[in-house]
Image (cartoon, rainbow, N blue to C red):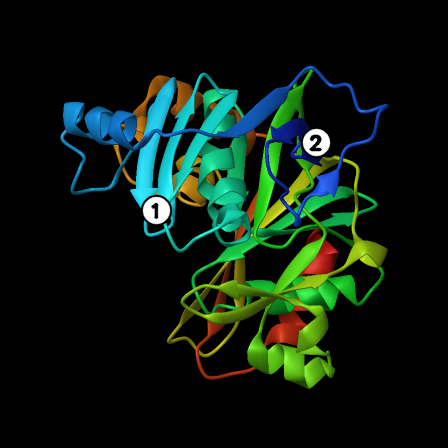
Amino acid sequence: MHRYKIYGIILESEFELNLLVPAGDSDTVQDVITVRERDVETDVIRFLAEHDAVEKLYEIGLNKSAFYNRGGFYLIQNGNEIWVKIKEGYDYDTISVWITGFCLSIALLQRGVLTIHCSAVSTKEGAVLISGTPGAGKSSLAGKLLETRLRLLADDVAGIRFSNDECLVYPAFPFQKLCSNEIEKRGLDKKNLIYINEDKDKYLVPVNDIFEYNPQKANSFFYIIKAPVEELTIRKLSGFECFMSIRDNLFLHRLKGSWENSKEVIDMCMKTASKFKIYLIIRPENKDTLDEIYHKVLSLI
């Protein structure tokens, strides 16, 4: 079995997952999730049929979940097992993005751990999470913060775990997702990068030198949107708005279902929201305000 560290757990896999950080002999945490290849196609279809979800392609449960896509069939249960059947024409490398994405996020949810769709950086004051609508500038802001000697915790998904009532943000893996035009702008050689076969033309760029491998205490959460306004505004959220900011930015939020309204998930989101200073950033649609946002974010951390 191959062993990896991610989100404060050990992921044991029958096949290599090259994106992840290998676990050493001294990494003996009790939280272990195993990934195994099994013929689960029938089990997945049966489970989805029992929940009238065959056409929806997925069903998320806090004990058992299943989904299928163009790459394979996936069964996740008890917060510690991920079983995969790979479809013809695909291999371990091409489905690894789904294993480390949806499969792992579902298994963690079953363990009471939230994964947030965001960039996350480490500061002296703790972890700063940056999320937003597509094209709002989440990655650009994170990139600018990293230029000031901050460290990267997560480029796309961060793990939120509690330890003795302390909210900790756990690192994902030491890569940044960059579009092809950003790769060319930085003068990087695509031959040395990992191409992601996604809807967008993106590559994974290793960032070991600026990656933070240790969990960080929760500090701030910034959500960015673009709007037809003249000036940049930043507003601190409170109460129900904070809860919604966490709930609506769960990595699994796109897989809508009754699971989002379960008491367990609502309680986790409320508890998490109470540990962050949460801000809404509204930036003008047709104006470059990145520098202004950057300086205001630094003043609020």
Query: Image check: 83 left or right of 69?
Result: right
Q: Residue type at mark 2? A: Arg
Across and down, in percent, residue 232 comes to: 53, 71
Across and down, in percent, residue 213 comes to: 79, 41
Relative vertical location of residue 108 with respect to residue 181 in this rendering, above or below? above
**Is 60 in front, or is 251?**
60
What residue appears at the point 77 percent right and 32 percent down from the top-left corner? 23
Q: Is residue 147 visible?
A: yes
Provide the residue designation for mark 2.
3
Across and down, in percent, residue 167 comes to: 65, 28
Relative vertical location of residue 45 with respect to residue 200 in this rendering, above or below? above
Q: Earlier in the sequence, mark 2 or mark 1?
A: 2
**Is 157 in front, or is 66?**
66
SS at badge 1: helix
Q: Residue type at mark 1? A: Arg
Q: Quadrant of the N terminus?
A: top right
Q: Is residue 241 visible?
A: no
Query: Image check: 219 left or right of 198?
Result: right
Q: Which mark is residue 254?
A: 1
Q: Quadrant of residue 158?
A: top right
